[in-house]
Image: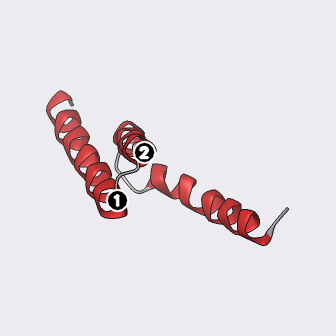
Amino acid sequence: MSETVRFILYLTTMTVPAIFYATSSPVSAAAGAFAALLLAYFRRSLITVALGASTAVFIAELVLSFIN
């Protein structure tokens, strides 16, 4: 396995769990992760992916606060 692939896998194992513990709800974390994956799939810039994921989490948290 190349050093680059090993490095990417190492970062992935550290980042993915952090995504689901960074918000107050796993639902909003999943919404943010889904938005990030969708934007990255369509090859948007890094800042667009970050802002889109943050916006998705913010909206999900607002919706969840009204539901609870």
The amino acid sitting under disc 2 is Ala
User: Do the CB atoms of the residues marked 1 and 2 lie less than 8 Å apart?
Assistant: no
Where is residue 59? Give x, y as percent. 19, 41
**Quarter placement of the C terminus:** top left
Q: Hey, which residue is sitting farthest front in the picture?
A: 43
In this orientation, which residue lies closer to the viewer: 62 or 13?
Answer: 13
Q: Nearer the viewer, mark 1 or mark 2?
A: 1
Q: Which residue is mark 2?
A: 33
Res 48 quadrant in image: bottom left
**Quarter placement of the N terminus:** bottom right
Residue 45: mark in rendering: 1
Residue that appears at 19% across and 28% down: 67
The amino acid sitting under disc 1 is Ser
Residue that appears at 33% across and 58% down: 50
Res 26 quadrant in image: top left
* Mark 1: secondary structure: loop
| Disc with the residue nearer the chain's start (1 vs 2) | 2
Residue that appears at 55% across and 53% down: 16
